[in-house]
Image (cartoon, rainbow, N blue to C red):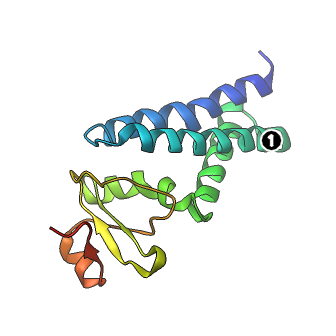
Amino acid sequence: MKPFAVASAWLTAFLLVIPMAGLAVAVAPLDTAAHFLAWYLVLLALAYILGLILLALIGLSPAWLRALVTAVLMYVVALVMPLTSAMASFPIHVIRCGGLPLVASDFAAGYNYRMPGSDYYIVTPLDSRFFCTEDEARAARYHLWPES
């Protein structure tokens, strides 16, 4: 197999297969999991396409190392880009909180958060913060939405 084909196969594993499998497990209890996973798959597909371009540009050997460097670079870029950072950082917060975090948004100065298990619990590109507990969210001056 040609080195580029091997590296792109490794990139597929690092950037698409492994993250999607982990996310499928993390968001399985969500009612809106399909909506989140669809948007996240679009994000990963775009990162994969950009990753293929990076693979062609860097010349590290072996192929798995080249793919790993490219995947890490693409994930770091997704973490700092507007409209992708919330969705890219969601798995990190699932691990940090030991479960699904509270999702908070300050879009249009709303400063609200949504609880896991709520009908309105979903991660969107407009979300800006994640909290592990309601006390953290309230301390940051966010309020529960929709209010009970």
Task: Please report the residue visible at 44 percent of the width from the left and 65 percent of the height from the top.
Answer: 127
For the point 59% across and 46% down, the residue is: 43
Q: Position of residue 33 (x, y in %)?
A: 36, 40
Rendered location of residue 19, percent (x, y)? 48, 39
Q: Is residue 123 above or below residue 45?
A: below
Q: Quadrant of the C terminus?
A: bottom left
At a point 30% along the width and 37% down the height, the residue shown is: 28
Q: Which quadrant would the N terminus be assigned to in this image? A: top right
How many labels were placed on the picture? 1
Rendered view: 71 above or below 89: above
Q: Farthest residue toward the right?
A: 57
Closer to us: 26 or 36? 36
Q: Residue 74: image x %, image y %?
A: 65, 50
Give the quarter of the image for residue 136.
bottom left
The residue that label 1 is drawn on is 53
Q: Is residue 7 left or right of residue 16?
A: right
Comparing 96 with 78, the one in front is 78
Write down the quadrant of residue 8 in the picture.
top right
Direction from residue 39 to residue 134 in the image, left or right: left
Instruction: Give the left or right position of residue 118, taking residue 126 as reference.
Output: left
Q: Residue furthest top?
A: 1
In depth, the one of 127 and 18 nearer the eye is: 127
Q: What SS does tag 1 mark?
A: helix
Residue at image position (71%, 31%) is 63
Badge 1 crowding class, 10 Å Cα cut-off, few under 14, some 14 to 19, many 20 or more, is few
Q: Position of residue 119 (x, y in %)?
A: 25, 51
Q: On screen, 40 above or below 141? A: above
Please, what is the three-letter code of the amino acid marked with disc 1? Ile
Q: Is residue 29 left or right of residue 130?
A: left
